[in-house]
Image (cartoon, helix red, strand yellow):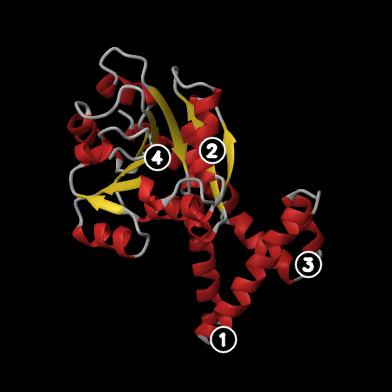
């Protein structure tokens, strides 16, 4: 029987999305099917999530009302060609692949028909119900399609709509963003160890500090710059650290790094 949702690619991000869908009861598990070449990932979806899983993407999409493309950008063209003859022309197609435009998907799957495509950029904190998802409608997708896509993500993420031209920036900020924070936390823990703390002591201090700082930003109307200044006493310890970072042009390096991620997103779409 056709399913409400076919998930093509059953990796970590697809798992996070499906877990959110199930926790929010947006779609029952017997109405979802996943496809992946990995037996291990298919087994996880079947045994842990109660989701039917197959190897063939074409068999998964047959008759599905919504198709969620969770494959890597470099795999997208071959996957699209493999399902082009099986996908329902009335299906809503949602893609999470960085850099891959709606037009690219429409041209391969649409065959001249007005295929409805929405690009989505989720991030991995969906796994803990704290995700961020930006959606961009393709030229044939309407408000009802946006609402349908929102329902798939909103149980585990905050959802916003942006124009398609902003998706590379979204990818660089929130799509890749968790890794930037992980990297900073990693270095802070390392600093604590080099200053004589144990790994556990340093990790405990850093994680709680990170959680507290984010909560303060979320609750306050003050800007991050204002919050930073409140902690930075002139000629104090924090001032010494911030001054060192500024002397190394850490602020501009951070901006340049995010711009590099956005540029890579653009390159993936070519």
Residue 140 x/y as whole percent: 44, 17
Q: Secondary structure at mark 1?
A: loop
Residue, disc 1: 197
Q: Quadrant of residue 216?
A: bottom right
Q: CA distance from mark 2 to mark 1?
A: 45 Å
Cα–Cα gap, marks 1 and 4: 41 Å
Distance of mark 2 from mark 4, alpha carbons? 13 Å
At a point 81% along the width and 65% down the height, the residue shown is 233
Q: Quadrant of residue 61?
A: top left
Q: Nearer the viewer, mark 3 or mark 2?
A: 2
Q: Nearer the viewer, residue 26 or 208?
A: 26
Number of residues whose C-alpha sits closer than 10 Å to that of mark 2, classed few (under 14), some (14–19) or many (20 or more) = many
Measuring 38% from the left and 25% from the top, which residue is drawn there? Answer: 102
Distance of mark 3 from mark 1, alpha carbons? 25 Å
Q: Residues within 10 Å of mark 3 (few under 14, many from 20)?
A: few
Q: Which residue is mark 2?
A: 150
Say whether residue 82 is left or right of residue 205: left
Q: Pointer 3: what residue?
A: 235
Q: Residue at x 56, y 50 (%)?
A: 155
- Residue beneath disc 4: 96
Closer to the chain start, of discs 1 and 4, is 4
Q: Nearer the viewer, mark 4 or mark 3?
A: 4
- Height in image: 229 above or below 78? below
Residue 162 - label: none
| Earlier-in-chain disc, 2 versus 4 | 4
* Front label number (2 vs 1): 2
In the rendering, at what x and y percent does residue 40 appear? 23, 62
- Distance between the alpha carbons at the discs numbered 3 and 2: 48 Å
Quarter the C terminus occupies: top left
Q: Secondary structure at mark 2?
A: helix
Q: Position of residue 30 (x, y in %)?
A: 36, 50
Which quarter of the figure is the N terminus placed in? top left
């Amino acid at each position: 029987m056709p399913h409400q949702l076919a998930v093509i690619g059953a990796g970590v991000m697809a798992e996070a999305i499906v877990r959110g869908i199930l926790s929010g009861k947006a779609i029952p598990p017997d109405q979802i099917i996943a496809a992946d070449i990995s037996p291990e990932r298919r087994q996880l979806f079947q045994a842990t999530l109660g989701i039917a899983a197959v190897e063939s993407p074409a068999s998964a999409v047959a008759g599905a009302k919504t198709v969620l493309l969770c494959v890597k950008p470099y795999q997208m063209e071959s996957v699209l060609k493999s399902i082009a003859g099986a996908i329902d022309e009335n299906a809503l197609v949602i893609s999470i692949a960085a850099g891959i435009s709606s037009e690219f998907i429409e041209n391969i799957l649409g065959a001249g028909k007005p295929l409805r495509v929405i690009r989505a950029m989720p991030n991995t904190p969906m796994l803990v119900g704290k995700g961020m998802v930006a959606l961009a409608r393709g030229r044939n997708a309407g408000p009802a399609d946006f609402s349908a896509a929102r329902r798939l993500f909103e149980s585990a993420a905050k959802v916003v709509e942006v124009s398609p031209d902003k998706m590379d920036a979204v990818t660089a900020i929130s799509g890749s963003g968790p890794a930037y924070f992980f990297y900073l936390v990693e270095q802070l823990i390392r600093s604590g160890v080099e200053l004589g703390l144990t790994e556990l002591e340093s990790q405990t201090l850093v994680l709680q500090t990170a959680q507290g700082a984010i909560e303060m930003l979320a609750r306050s109307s003050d800007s991050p710059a204002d919050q930073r200044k409140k902690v930075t006493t002139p000629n104090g310890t924090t001032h010494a650290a911030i001054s060192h970072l500024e002397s190394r042009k850490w602020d501009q390096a951070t901006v340049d790094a995010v711009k590099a991620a956005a540029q890579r997103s653009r390159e993936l779409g070519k």
